[in-house]
Image (tube, helix red, strand yellow):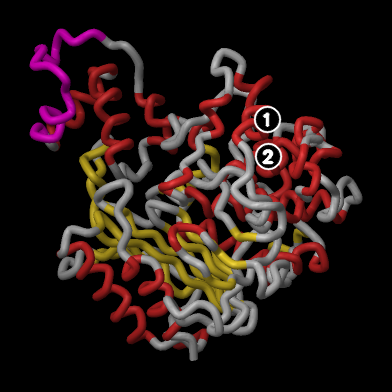
Amino acid sequence: MEKSDLMRIYHAECDASPSDVGYDPSALEELNRAIQTLMEEERIWSGSYALSRNGKVFADSTMGTLACNWCGHTDFTPDTLFELQSVGKVFTAIAVLKLMEEGRLSLDQPVMEWIPEFNHGEFREITILHLLTHTSGLCALDGTFPQDERRWWDFMNESDPGGTWLQAVVDTGLHARPGEKWIYSTIAYIVLGEIIRRASGEDPESFIEKNIFLPCDMKDTHWRRNATPEQIRRYNVANETDLGMVKQCMESDPEMVKQCMESDPEMVKNCMISDTDLETKQCKGNIMLMAAPTYPVWDGIPDTAGGQMSTCREMLHLGEMILNGGIYHGTRVIGEEALSYLWTPMTGPSVHNISFGRDEAIIYGAGMPIYSSSYDHEQVLSEGTIYHEGAGTCVFLVDRSKNFTAMFQTSFRHEFDWDERAVKGLATIIHSGIL
């Protein structure tokens, strides 16, 4: 690994040079400049990306810092693990498609055949495909409809989350009739996780790990709540929630406090609740506190709407599997016919995205948006490119026409910040280099 002192960029070893695979090196210079500008403006802490074409990784670079010193680390490096957020929904979608090809479920199957609580009113009309395409009408992501904010967990008995959450989803009601509107719904993918559980007979997280992570050689990719201490030491401390977890760790682990005190005493001071002498502070826990997900997870409820940690490089393994029709380095993960549902349009022109104040047509496959210049004017990609964004933020994309896949992340300084340049803008720059 080498580091450029000028821009503090880390470059991991790659399989080929950009020119070897038909990619303009100047686009990487522009990409680095754009990320550096966002850091100078204090919009983001860090930026990283990994790019592959024709099965060869030709870029794997990082720049910037963590939000604070963490276990002796300050820089974001290629082996830093970051949270995929909603990009993790892609794993859930592929798991459902795998169960479909095995004959265990069908996409037009009513959800109520798996979830009896859905045998109620218009919930009876919801199909598995509606869940995959965000057209179920189920409770939307927080902030989607400020005038109609619904929180399904408010209807749940937290003393028995596993036994009451599905009824809570139904009690929350629908924003729209199934199939009529595109409304981004995190709970739809949690319900899909429950269907995976019932169709496979396994915990959905275990099913995904066994059938996707492992055959794609994604050894570092894991759910945050299942992390090992070694993995946690490589975590990206990215936002206020993460800083709160660091604060807890500082209060509970004297050895970590000592280690960090030596390298960044100001950070330790800022993370301590009281001025109690560090040497006499009681140990209440350890580094494993950082394994807590950055969004609520209750026992008995599937963690299939996000929550995984990974690196840009490992996400290229998933992209390569998709480009190779479901095969990764000779190992069959899923059949090409089933996988093709990801890039086959499943929503018609009459189905409009009405999330976050929009009212526009959207093309969505069975788990990922499909780029079309006719509808998406915020970024410039190849027609038919499939992609998924994750808040925080990160983007995974696969361009079958150019045999190209990419993953990038930009850690916003504040958890709920948004800057289109760090998402759509970087995606456009990345695509511009394909020759």
| Disc 1 secondary structure class | helix
Q: Which corner quadrant holds the N terminus? A: bottom left
Q: Which residue is at 24% across, 54% downward?
A: 45
Residue 259 belongs to the span the image colors magenta: no
Q: Position of residue 390 (x, y in %)?
A: 47, 55
Residue 233 location in percent, x, y?
36, 36
For the residue marked with disc 1, what is the amino acid?
A: Leu
Is 264 drawn above or below residue 43 in the view shown? above
> In the displayed structure, does residue 69 sit left or right of residue 136?
left
Please tell me which of labels 2 and 1 falls first in the chain: 1
Q: Are marks 2 and 1 in contact (CB under 8 Å)?
A: yes
Mark 2 neighbour class, 10 Å CA radius: few under 14, some 14 to 19, many 20 or more:
many
Can you say whether 150 is above or below 261 in the image?
below
From where the camera sits, is residue 121 visible? yes
Residue ID at (51%, 38%): 150
Nearer-the-camera pick, 423 or 339:
423
Which labelled disc corresponds to residue 166?
1
Q: Amino acid at mark 2?
A: Val
Where does label 2 land, which residue? 191
Please state which of residues 383 and 183 is positioned toward the viewer in this rendering: 183
Residue 50 in percent (x, y) is at 45, 66
Q: CA distance from mark 2 to mark 1?
A: 8 Å
Q: What segment carries the magenta color?
A: 265-282
Q: Secondary structure at mark 2?
A: helix
User: Where is residue 336, by image quadrant?
Assistant: bottom right
Considering depth in this image, is 44 or 179 the residue closer to the camera? 179
Locate residue 401 relative to residue 65 in the image: left or right. Answer: right
Please determine whether, in this image, residue 323 is positioned above or below residue 216: below
Name the residue located 11 percent from the left edge and 12 percent from the top edge: 276
